[in-house]
Image (cartoon, rainbow, N blue to C red):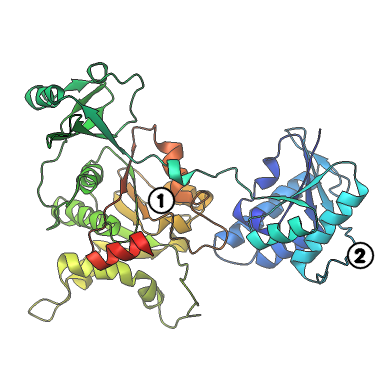
Amino acid sequence: MRKIYLLDTNVILHDPRAIFSFEDNLVIIPMVVIEEVDDQKKRQDSVGRNARLFSRYLDGLRKKGKLSEGVELESSGLVRIESEYEKDFSEGLDVNKADNKILATALYLQRSQDYSVILVSKDINMRIKSDAIDIKAEDYETDAVNVDELYSGLLNLKVSPAKIDKFFKTKNLSLEELGLEEELHPNQYVNLEDEFGGSQSALCRYDMVRKSLVPLIFDKKEVWGISPRNREQKCAFELLLNDNIKLVTLVGKAGTGKTLLALAAGLQKVVEEKEYKKLIVTRPIVPMGNDLGYLPGDKDEKLAPWMKPIFDNMEFLVGGNDNDGGNPVADLKAMNLIEMEAITYIRGRSIPDQFIIVDEAQNLTPHELKTIITRAGENSKIILTGDPYQIDHPYLDSNSNGLTYVVERLKDKKLFGHMTLNKGERSKLAELAASCL
């Protein structure tokens, strides 16, 4: 039976192609949603871009028929713009508010149609209000991932001590010998543990060509003065230093070293090894708490408050002010080896031969991350870092953000590597807060 899906404005601004995601059902766009989308079209960020893109999609459909009557999609579904809404809206809500007018449209359709109406919204309060007036509501979850089952990048495997000894002697252990029926993911790491509870263990990586476990590639004790403090950090450095892996994601709570490891590897590759021409660091400008409003100055001055966590880590790695009163970070910027950039200015660029770090990537949508990753030119490497449980974006959560989406969609690709960092290394206090608060 055909269903009626009524879309909230935030769904369209999250994914401008949302109207094509409901198979052969009827998709309703309230007229007030068209007005709200129109109000956002001049913005110079991803929201503005999505608003303009959605308008172009509707304009293309308009040429195929009347949107007021419904235009058929390739999926055999229909898209229709609905201008009518329930005038007698005696639910204790002000119908002059845009959100309530969307609810009134859903109520009108429910009372005049033979089919049930489903409101699709990424706004939790909107879904609560919809349920209160007996309208079924759902989140838009076409790109949702169960974060509790997120691929970690490191498999702990209990084996006999004899197999661990064999690995150290032969530097090789096949999946058949381990009794693994399924293949591991490319660039996945395995920690072999003594099944009898002994202290013996071996950290190895999966070689998809030989279908076996082999030793780690890099045996560096330090990378730009930073030593890995646990297994996950050691595996993270393996991914960061391997130029054959073009996209790396590092996920972990605050204090696990995600950003610091990425910056250390970036400096090593750009300044020391000269494998890349420049280190680019960017992060979404999403405030935590009350926004500061518009900031004066040029681009670098405007970015300074948002990039302060990056500068803190960078100064820790290269030193703040040296004995001569200089600033090593400023010197690297002056030499055009480091660039701090806003996400907004990444779009439209082609970036070859760069080591690119996208910090706080959990605050980006899947579409935004796709846009950023497709900017990578020849011989560029992209690092995405973030914590899915610390999201400041109003319409993203731990399951629907772009970072977790990328991890799940690309875990089977040989150009991709992922590591989840679990242990906090910043300080005992930071670990206590991240774990218990």
Q: Compared with residue 315, is residue 166 higher up or lower down, i.e. above or below?
A: above
Q: Earlier in the sequence, mark 2 or mark 1?
A: 2
Q: Compared with residue 273, is residue 3 higher up or lower down, i.e. above or below?
A: above
What residue does disc 1 label?
350
What residue does disc 2 label?
87
Q: Is residue 154 left or right of residue 135?
A: left
Count of labels in the image: 2
**Pointers 2 and 1 in contact (CB under 8 A)?**
no
Tell me which amino acid carries mark 1.
Ser
In this rendered view, identify the residue nearer to me: 97 or 116. Answer: 116
Q: Is residue 366 left or right of residue 319?
A: right
Whether residue 242 can be seen here: yes
The image quadrant where one finds the N terminus is: top right
Q: Classify mark 1: helix, strand or loop.
A: loop
Report x, y in % for residue 385: 35, 54
The residue that appears at 59% across and 58% down in the rendered structure is 49
Q: Classify mark 2: helix, strand or loop.
A: loop
In this rendered view, identify the residue nearer to me: 335 or 69. Answer: 69
The residue that appears at 26% across and 63% down in the rendered structure is 338
The image quadrant where one finds the C terminus is: bottom left
